[in-house]
């Protein structure tokens, strides 16, 4: 948060106080955006949702997102550190989506922002605006006890939304919506890799962008779900394709290498031997000989 505020724990501002990010981005802290006027949309992950007046958006650390602020809009943005909101929770920020709402109910709107529009009625939104004004005052004139007051006000804001959306938030938690979103994201990544496997320049940053995840998130989820890094996953897919081409065709090894995303035949042969114990040409001959003997 240092690039936004001299304080590392909590910071609240309007859209005039700082130039926000104009494109899809991520940051290491929590963020809440509140729309006091000026209808727009928000992009979070691969989802686009409406973001009209009276709406709140809750963004987890490292989550790819973008909310465009109209020039005539009126917004408040709250940034805060994980240990400000959840000092009791010893958890990697990338694991927050797996924390149960029973253990940390204040995480609920952040975990399920991709699935819900938090748009409040005027009376409820007025209460939120009162909380925001108090936050602005206490954050501007920090003194002894201000941090605790700010945390209390922040919890009131989050608690208000949790109370108003208790039923859908609970249902989403019971249906493991966050895990389903993760599986969908990894499926998009897998499809992107499949389409670009022949490209020697295929890399983590490209796949993450196509998947609407940060490279950090994608790396973490791959390790968590399949126990592999991105480069290990791509190599595995390339070796699968190489085996198929070697056993079901007669194209030269160099052409197989090119088709599988290796610009250098010698490098392809070395990697193939590391995985299969023999170079690709010998692998093809031995496998075809074995198949012929079995017929």
Image (spheres, rainbow, N blue to C red):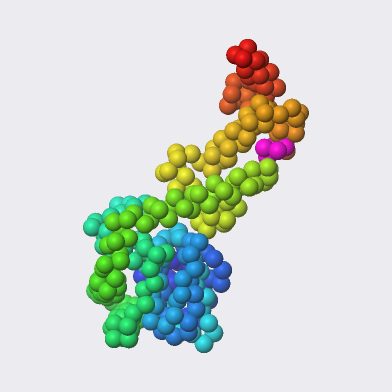
Q: Position of residue 196 (x, y in %)?
A: 64, 47
Q: Residue at x 42, y 60 (%)?
A: 61
User: In the image, is 226 to the left or to the right of 240?
Assistant: left
Quarter occupied by residue 137: bottom left
Q: Position of residue 42 (x, y in %)?
A: 48, 71
Q: Residue at x 27, y 62 (%)?
A: 170
Would you say residue 141 is visible in this rendering?
Answer: no
Q: Position of residue 179 (x, y in %)?
A: 38, 52
Would you say residue 196 is visible in this rendering?
Answer: yes
Q: Residue furthest front?
A: 295
Relative depth, front residue between 220 and 234 = 234
Span colored in magenta: 258-262
Relative depth, front residue between 106 and 186 = 186
In magenta stretch: residue 192: no
Relative depth, front residue between 13 and 71 = 71
Q: Main secondary structure of the magenta part?
A: loop
Q: Residue at x 62, y 17 (%)?
A: 291
Q: Is residue 274 above or below residue 174?
A: above
Quarter occupied by residue 74: bottom left
Quarter holding the N terminus?
bottom left
Report how many numbered discs are placed on residues in the image: 0
Q: Position of residue 67 (x, y in %)?
A: 49, 73
Quarter holding the C terminus?
top right
Q: Residue at x 63, y 35 (%)?
A: 241
In magenta stretch: residue 260: yes
Q: Is residue 193 above or below residue 114?
A: above
User: In the image, is 130 to the left or to the right of 54?
Assistant: left
Q: Is residue 66 above or below residue 53?
A: above
Q: Residue furthest top?
A: 293
Quarter occupied by residue 159: bottom left
């Amino acid at each position: 948060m240092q690039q936004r505020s001299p304080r590392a724990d909590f910071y609240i501002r309007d859209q005039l106080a700082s130039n926000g990010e104009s494109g899809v981005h991520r940051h290491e802290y929590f963020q809440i955006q509140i729309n006091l006027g000026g209808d727009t949309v928000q992009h979070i992950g691969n989802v686009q949702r409406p973001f009209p007046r009276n709406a709140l958006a809750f963004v987890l650390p490292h989550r790819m997102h973008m909310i465009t602020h109209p020039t005539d809009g009126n917004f408040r943005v709250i940034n805060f550190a994980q240990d400000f909101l959840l000092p009791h929770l010893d958890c990697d920020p990338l694991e927050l989506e797996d924390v149960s709402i029973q253990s940390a109910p204040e995480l609920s709107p952040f975990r399920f922002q991709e699935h819900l529009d938090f748009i409040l009625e005027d009376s409820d939104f007025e209460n939120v605006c009162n909380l925001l004004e108090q936050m602005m005052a206490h954050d501007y004139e920090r003194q002894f006890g201000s941090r605790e007051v700010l945390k209390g006000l922040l919890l009131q804001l989050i608690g208000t939304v949790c109370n108003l959306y208790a039923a859908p938030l609970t249902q989403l938690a019971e249906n493991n919506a966050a895990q389903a979103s993760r599986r969908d994201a990894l499926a998009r990544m897998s499809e992107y890799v499949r389409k670009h496997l022949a490209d020697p320049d295929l890399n983590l940053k490209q796949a993450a962008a196509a998947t609407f995840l940060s490279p950090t998130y994608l790396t973490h989820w791959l390790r968590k779900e399949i126990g592999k890094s991105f480069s290990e996953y791509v190599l595995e897919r390339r070796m699968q394709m190489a085996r198929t081409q070697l056993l079901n065709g007669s194209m030269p090894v160099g052409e197989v290498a090119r088709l599988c995303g290796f610009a250098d035949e010698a490098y392809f042969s070395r990697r193939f031997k590391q995985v299969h114990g023999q170079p690709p040409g010998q692998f093809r001959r031995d496998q075809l000989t074995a198949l012929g003997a079995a017929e």
